[in-house]
Amino acid sequence: MTTRSAFVVQDDGTLAVYQHADDIFDYVLDFADLLVGGDTIASSAWTGTGVSIVAPLQGAATASAFVAGTNGIVSHTVTTTAGRRKRTDFAVLPLPVVALPA
């Protein structure tokens, strides 16, 4: 069974993940393409609106955090030592309810 939600691109072009309100899943953002010429991640900041951000981590080319809850927005901003900055936002949506046949 796969228990971890994957990023999906919604019809309007925004990113989203689906998870149950009781789920706490980790999400990893990879910035290898942003880090050119020996640039490195200087800072990584996560915020959640309507969801909780738990245990954020910063790696050499990645940033990750656990997200708890649903019906919210996660925002992440990474800044590199060369001064590049990238913001990533994604919606955390509830799993669709599937009706069972009668």
Image (cartoon, rainbow, N blue to C red):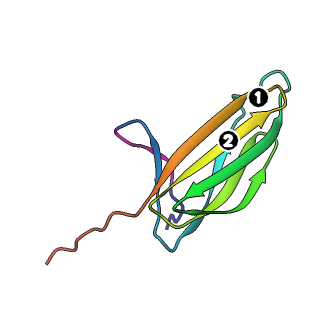
- Residue at x 51% of width, y 74% of height: 22
> In what element is the residue under mark 1?
loop
Q: Nearer the viewer, residue 3 or 39?
A: 39
Task: Residue lying at the far left in this picture: please name it.
Answer: 102
Q: Nearer the viewer, mark 1 or mark 2?
A: 2
Which numbered disc, 1 or 2, marks the residue that appears first in the sequence? 1
Task: Residue lying at the far front in this picture: please name it.
Answer: 49
Residue marked by disc 1: 35
- Residue at x 86% of width, y 26% of height: 38
Q: Amino acid at mark 2?
A: Thr
The majority secondary structure of the magenta stretch comes to loop
Rendered view: 36 above or below 44: above
- Residue at x 56% of width, y 52% of height: 74
Question: Relative to 33, is 15 on the left or the right?
Answer: left
Residue marked by disc 2: 77
Which image quadrant: the C terminus? Answer: bottom left
Point out residue 13 in the picture as x, y percentages from the top left corner.
41, 36
- Any magenta on residue 9? yes
Give, as a single range, the part of the protein colored magenta. 6-11
Question: Relative to 52, is 1 on the left or the right?
Answer: left
Point out residue 51 in the picture as x, y percentages from the top left corner.
55, 63
